[in-house]
Image: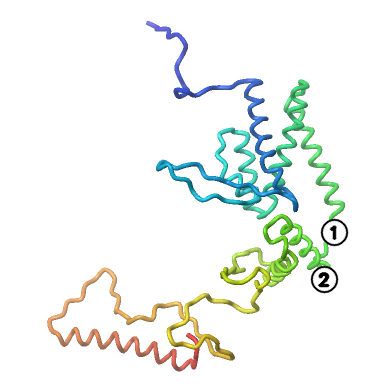
Amino acid sequence: MHRIFGGGAQILQNGASEERGENARLQAFIGAIAIGDMVKSTLGPKGMDKILQPMPGQDGGRGQATVTNDGATILKAVWIDNPAAKILVDISKTQDQECGDGTTSVVVLAAELLRNAQILVEQRMHPQVIIKGYRIALAAAREKLESLATDNGKDDVAFREDLLRIARTTLSSKLLKHEKEHFATLAVDAVLRLQGKPNLDYIQVLKKAGASLKDSFLEEGFILEKKIGVGMPKVLEDCRIMVANCQMDTDKIKIYGARVKVDSFEAVAEIEAAEKEKMKQKIDRIVAHGCNVF
């Protein structure tokens, strides 16, 4: 026996809606283009900042407001439920992870491509034809860029100047734009010291409050951020330094997963004496090094 149910099974949750055909395509276009228009005004050296006010939490309180013109930061803070707009946000995150810059540019470019695609779709052009045209344009643009590209890798002076131009362009839209020449030089010098190594984690950035941006500098050696002991001198020159990667408290004989049972206080005293002797040997080796900074 077969039973026929009217209306079919309910797949969507209560209150959810479904868009199909032209309506779904229109919603995708509108959401993506709106994201591009939102961050477009922050692009370039004359870009404006956005004030980001977090949504109220469950307790009714609001978080701290943020002022920024960074596209990735803005898109991370915006709550989005449009699938096409979420794709643009993912594009911005990928660009930030791969290059560290250009997050706003890729979103604006993608939004403008969709804006022009919407016009062609409204003229009854098939989306696959539009995609094919964009791929042809991509190949043509890549070929043109490769023909215009120059390689100054063998000329150290020209290569350094190219890096400085890239750094200046990157800093033109940031808060450091008033000191971009100084920070561009710091960034290029730091990168060149890596000698081609791709790991930027080797560059350590220490932030200290109390001075101006102009006082930032690139140290020739290695800076280890540690607190100076009480009563110790603040400045030492031509010193011998030892860096230890182990704790300097009283050494305990570590026997993991086992217990030591003794039958007399003399045995406890022998264990303590062994610990002191181990610590004394470590100190003797440090003293023999002749360091005055530890």
Image quadrant holding the N terminus, namely top left
Along the line of sight, which residue is nearer the eye, 4 or 122?
122
Give residue 113's position: percent from left, percent from top. Answer: 75, 36
Secondary structure of residue under mark 2? helix
- Residue type marked 2: Val
x%, y% of residue 251? 33, 81
Look at the picture and state if 255 lies above or below 91: below
Furthest residue in direction top, as rendered? 1
Given residues 111 and 147, the one toward you in this image is 111
Q: In which quarter of the image is residue 249?
A: bottom left
Between the C-alphas of marks 2 and 1, the distance is 14 Å
Residue found 13% across the figure and 84% down from its top: 264
Query: Mark 1 belongs to which amino acid?
Result: Thr
Q: Is 197 left or right of 5, judged from the image as shown?
A: right
On the image, numbered disc 2 is attached to which residue?
Answer: 157
Residue at figure coordinates x 43%, y 90% from the top left:
285
Q: In this view, does 200 lie above or below 12?
A: below
Residue drawn 66% across and 25% down?
26
Residue 248 in picture, x, y percent from top left: 38, 81
Determine the residue positioned at 65% across, 78% down: 220
Q: Locate residue 236: give its quadrant.
A: bottom right
Q: Nearer the viewer, residue 132 or 178?
A: 178
Name the side, left or right, on which 231 lies relative to 221. Answer: left
Category of crowding for the residue at label 1, using alpha-carbon neighbours closer than 10 angstroms: few (below 14), some (14–19), many (at least 20): few
Please, what secondary structure does the residue beneath circle 1 have?
Answer: loop
Residue 150's mark?
A: 1
Image quadrant in which you'd find residue 170: bottom right
**Mark with earlier residue (2, 1):** 1
